[in-house]
């Protein structure tokens, strides 16, 4: 479930569960969150990249024991389908700072990567298959796949039905459920390395490919 705080602050709550990276061509864009952003263009890839100049403070990233006990989550609302049904390059930056929630785990999205169907790395470039069918659904659904048969990658489907675009959740910061995250990740650290990588995000949320096509705008448990 993607939700919003007082002003739209995205939160994805999944008990059916599920998050992006920098480097982009005209059809791909990676964005990272920070207090100060620097946009750079790569001549080799013609990529539009947004990078952080400052790291989030330890106070900001240290998870709490339970999402239910956090006052800031009491007024959250689930983001509607229309929020996601825009161009992937436009959706990507709007996902930064939003939250993904499944059971007691709440993650704040800090890095994403957008893929349009004309991108050679986009799974929708060859059309609809059994695995990629969710990418062609309406924006707001999850597209989950295995990378190298090991890493569970969570994507947020973007744009209108049939577009074949998505935003990959590449990194997050833990907000709640640190013990659960550490157990799933097999690491006891609280450092950013715990969730810097799309496979780590999927593992922390405890999702599988069964969550592919799950509507992120519906309530989880």
Image (spheres, helix red, strand yellow):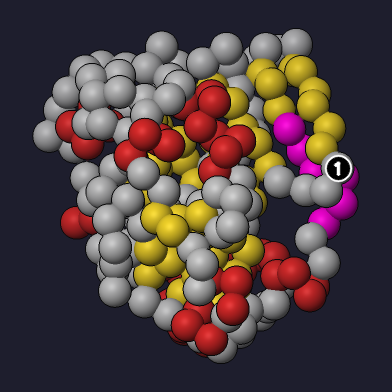
Residue 120: image quadrant is top left
Residue 218 screen position, x and y as percent:
27, 56
Instruction: Please state which of residues 147 and 127 is positioned toward the viewer in this rendering.
Output: 127
List the residue tagged with mark 1: 36
Specify the quadrant that holds the N terminus: bottom left
Instruction: Please state which of residues 52 and 5 is positioned toward the viewer in this rendering.
Output: 5
Q: Is residue 121 left or right of residue 38?
A: left
Residue 146 against residue 89 in the figure, above or below: below
Instruction: Please state which of residues 164 and 44 is positioned toward the viewer in this rendering.
Output: 164
Specify whether residue 20 is painted magenta. no
Q: Is residue 74 left or right of residue 49?
A: left
Residue 22 screen position, x and y as percent:
64, 34
Residue 10 in sight from this viewpoint: yes
Residue 174 against residue 51 in the figure, above or below: below
Residue 152 in sight from this viewpoint: no
Report the span colored magenta.
50-55
Specify the quadrant that holds the C terminus: bottom left
Extreme residue in the left direction? 130
SS at badge 1: loop
Query: Local crowd at mark 1 within 10 Å, few (<14), some, or many (≥20)?
Result: few
Residue 139 screen position, x and y as percent:
32, 33
Residue 123 screen position, x and y as percent:
33, 27
Residue plotted at (76% across, 18% down): 41
Residue 182 against residue 51 in the figure, above or below: below
Residue plotted at (84% across, 32% down): 38
Q: Is residue 169 left or right of residue 18?
A: right
Residue plotted at (53% across, 24% down): 89
Residue 159: image quadrant is top left
Residue plotted at (54% across, 26% down): 90
């Amino acid at each position: 479930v993607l939700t919003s705080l007082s002003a739209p602050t995205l939160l994805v709550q999944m008990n059916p569960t599920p998050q992006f990276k920098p480097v982009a061509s005209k059809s791909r864009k990676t964005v990272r969150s920070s207090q100060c952003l620097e946009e750079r263009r790569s001549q080799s890839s013609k990529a539009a990249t947004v990078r952080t100049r400052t790291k989030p403070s330890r106070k900001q990233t240290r998870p709490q024991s339970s999402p239910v006990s956090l006052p800031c989550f009491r007024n959250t609302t689930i983001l509607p389908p229309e929020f996601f049904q825009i161009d992937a390059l436009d959706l990507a930056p709007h996902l930064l700072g939003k939250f993904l929630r499944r059971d007691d785990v709440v993650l704040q999205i800090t890095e994403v990567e957008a893929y349009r169907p004309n991108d050679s790395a986009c799974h929708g470039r060859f059309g609809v298959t059994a695995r990629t069918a969710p990418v062609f659904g309406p924006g707001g659904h999850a597209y989950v796949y295995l990378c190298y048969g090991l890493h569970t990658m969570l994507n947020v489907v973007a744009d209108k039905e049939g577009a074949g675009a998505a935003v990959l959740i590449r990194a997050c910061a833990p907000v709640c459920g640190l013990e659960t995250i550490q157990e799933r990740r097999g690491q006891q650290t609280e450092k950013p390395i715990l969730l810097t990588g799309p496979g780590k995000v999927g593992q922390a949320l405890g999702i599988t490919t069964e969550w592919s096509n799950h509507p992120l705008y519906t309530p989880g448990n």
